[in-house]
Image: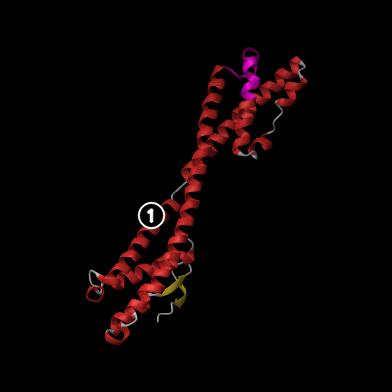
Amino acid sequence: MNKNQLNKFRMYEAVNLVLDTHPAQVGNEGDLFMAQQLLKSGQEIIGQNRQVQEADTSGLTQKKRELRNELIKLMLLFAVGLKAQATIAKDLELKTKADYKPSELKTSTDDRLFDIAALLKGLALPLRSDLVRYFIGETQFREMERLLFEFKLAIPKRRVAINRSKTSTSNIAGVFKSQDKLLKEHLDALVAPYQFSQPDFFHAYRNARSIVGYTGRGKAEKVVTEKIP
């Protein structure tokens, strides 16, 4: 949630608290009671989506970063070995295909990096026996296979986490809109008559409907009071 949404969410909580502490006025049935239940339901939905939105995806990011670094290191070994072999064999085409610099690999997208790694592996397979002299043996081929497999899996996992967060952000915005409409068009109107018969309840509700603009440092920046009929 952004700061404005967080401030509104605090206001929803304050309104619910006032209604919870005035059971005689709210009752356990009727329009006011049902309106509060809808407000609570909206809060619960916001809370659920907020957990998804704020889920820690840093673990996925760190894992993928480690895989990238390992993969790039091995790719450079393959590239250097292939170029050395191409030089001896005077194979200009192979030398050109295997010519990748560290800076190019480090700035490649995940998908492109995977494709380049698969290409280097494919170029190296027919030359397995020749590449041993360049420190590329069975261990390195198995490691390349493992890294390609794990890195490919890591890419969609990160995307899924990001997409879930975006979906939750969209869901939260929709619920906030519904909550605001519920307050302005129903709860405010239902509580308004109490200003004459039970002013303490009315003023407590009205104060709860004030949106405090927190700066994020624990200090209030400003107070915006919603208009209540």
Residue at 43% from the left image edge and 69% from the top image edge: 180
Q: Residue furthest front?
A: 30
Relative image position of residue 115 (x, y in whole percent): 62, 31
In the image, residue 81 sits, relative to residue 229, either above or below, namely above
Left or right for 80, reference 156: right
Q: Secondary structure at mark 1?
A: helix
Residue 67 locus on image (x, y percent): 53, 34
**Quick check: 7 above or below 194?**
above
Q: Which residues are magenta?
A: 120-137
Q: Is residue 135 above or below residue 214?
A: above
Q: Does residue 61 appear in the picture of this structure?
A: no
The answer to which image quadrant residue 140 occupies is top right
Of residue 112 and residue 193, the one placed in the foreground of this image is: 193
Query: Residue 30: horizontal and vertical position, in percent?
Result: 26, 71
- Left or right: residue 202 versus residue 219 is left
Q: Is residue 188 magenta?
A: no
Instruction: Judge whether residue 121 is colored magenta.
Output: yes
Magenta: main secondary structure: helix
Q: Relative to the observer, which residue lies in front, 210 or 198?
A: 198
Image quadrant assignment for residue 83: top right
Near mark 1 (Cα within 10 A), the count class, few <14, some 14-19 or many ≥20, is few
Outermost top residue: 129
The residue at which mark 1 appears reads as: 48
Q: Is residue 67 left or right of residue 228?
A: right
Quarter of the image holding residue 188? bottom left
Kindly identify the residue that appears in the image at 53 percent across and 21 percent down: 142
Q: Amino acid at mark 1?
A: Gln
Q: How many marks?
A: 1
Quadrant holding the C terminus: bottom left
